[in-house]
Image (tube, grey):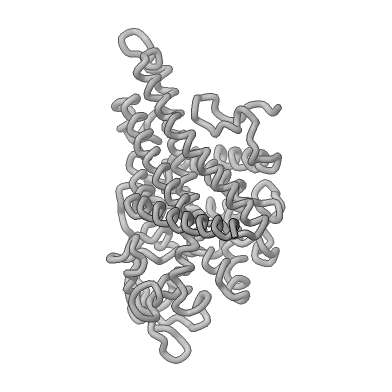
Amino acid sequence: MDAPFGSPVPYAEPQWYSRDCSPYHNDSHKKLRAFVREYVEMELMPYAQEWEEQGFVPDETIKRFAKNGFCVIDRSKPEYMGGIGLPAGIAPEEWDVFHTLIVTDELNRVGYTGPIWGLNAGNSIGCPPIMNFGTEKQKLEYMPKVARGEIRFCLGVTEPDAGSDVSGIKTVAKKVGDRYIVNGAKKWITNGIWADYCTAAVRTGGPGHGGISFLIIPLTAEGVTRRRMFNSGVHASGSTFLEFADVEVPLENLIGKENEGFKYIMSNFNPERLTLASACIRLSRVCVEDAFKYSTTRETFGKPLLANQVIRAKISKMGQLIEPCQAFMDQLAYTIKTSEKTGRKVDIGGMTALLKVMSTRCLEKVCREAQQIMGGAGYNKAGKGSRIEAISRDVRVYVVGGGSEEILQDLSVREELKHMRKAMEAQKRAKL
């Protein structure tokens, strides 16, 4: 049995880190975990708060991030990887969804979402439409450069009047000769201020789901205007307001088929929500760790805070919230992995929506309780409570991003009703 890995604080790490008894993880996962942990400790942890305060991650840090393989999006062919190996030297054919979740989990140990999103979030959500639906020419043009950290993407779906209701997109792309003319606006676009390209959802047809397409829009094109947005948290993520005024985009920049963009957007949501859930679970663990450590050193009325039953009860409640989310996420990840191996399509849209709601509510509650334990220290942007203070502001972007919880709760039930009907039909056929 391997020695325990990471923090010994209760609930500060996934159980398999200390108990070495996971049915999902193998030696390659452990190797990757150690690699990312060391990278974060050396390259990110000492500087993350400074980057969040200044509002950006230095270019040289992003270059090193890419050099370590974290910007590789498409592993299906070596030529898409731009000569860059995967983190920890993991072979592309060996990489699975658990490797991806380990990277997300370990990166978020810094406790500051802004710098983590500033490193690569735009690529991670802006490139999959190209990877999954783009032409071979598009993949060869963009994926190697992304992997090397030479160019950056952002995803342009959200608009001033279209958030969770994606069918309400108003940005229009009109076909004129050999190009599209794009007019409209995108809002809260992560990394948009620095990105070279925007994978943008645009309206090429009629109203509703059926008239949406995806275009690769160069953000250096004439008619593109960018304005930095300043929100409650995630300052280093580069949240941006994009405007398109008669922007000319070549027809060859269409991703997939015209007017089929809605299903491309939907395919992006499951991985995005799984990643958001993973981040929320780790940030919850950060809150537990910092609050627990504080409770062992802070004395009130002649004894440490942890000596009080009410404080131990709060920490226990944190564990009760965190560990079910972790178990649910691991089971969904295993379902995805099995589906990829067998080629059998599995409907998990409702479950990923449910997980995202669970994990964000978990983070909200755990962060609040951590601040209660730390008192004024948890409200201070410096010192022992600085990570918890930052998380208390960042948490709202997780609750709203990737679909609000009201939308996702309804979606989860509607998707499960579809699954129920399919299951009942299959049972009827089996009896015939």
- Direction from residue 162 to residue 99 in the image, left or right: right
Q: Against 196, is 178 above or below? A: below
- Direction from residue 168 to residue 432 in the image, left or right: right
Q: Quadrant of residue 6?
A: top right
Q: Against 297, is 389 above or below? A: below
Residue 260 horizontal/vertical position (percent): 47, 75
Q: Quadrant of the N terminus?
A: top right
Pick the front one: 37 or 28: 28
* Residue 165 in sight here: yes
The residue that appears at 52% across and 81% down in the rendered structure is 252
Pick the front one: 383 or 282: 282
Residue 44 horizontal/vertical position (percent): 51, 42
Give the farthest residue toward the front.
432
Q: Quadrant of the C terminus?
A: bottom right
Q: Against 63, is 298 above or below? A: above
Residue 278 horizontal/vertical position (percent): 49, 44
Q: Against 373, is 257 above or below? A: below
The residue that appears at 55% across and 37% down in the rendered structure is 41
* Residue 120 in sight here: no
- Direction from residue 2 to residue 389 in the image, left or right: left
Total numbered badges shown on the rendered structure: 0
The residue that appears at 39% across and 12% down in the rendered structure is 307
Pick the front one: 107 or 367: 367
Residue 176 horizontal/vertical position (percent): 41, 89
Give the farthest residue toward the top.
302
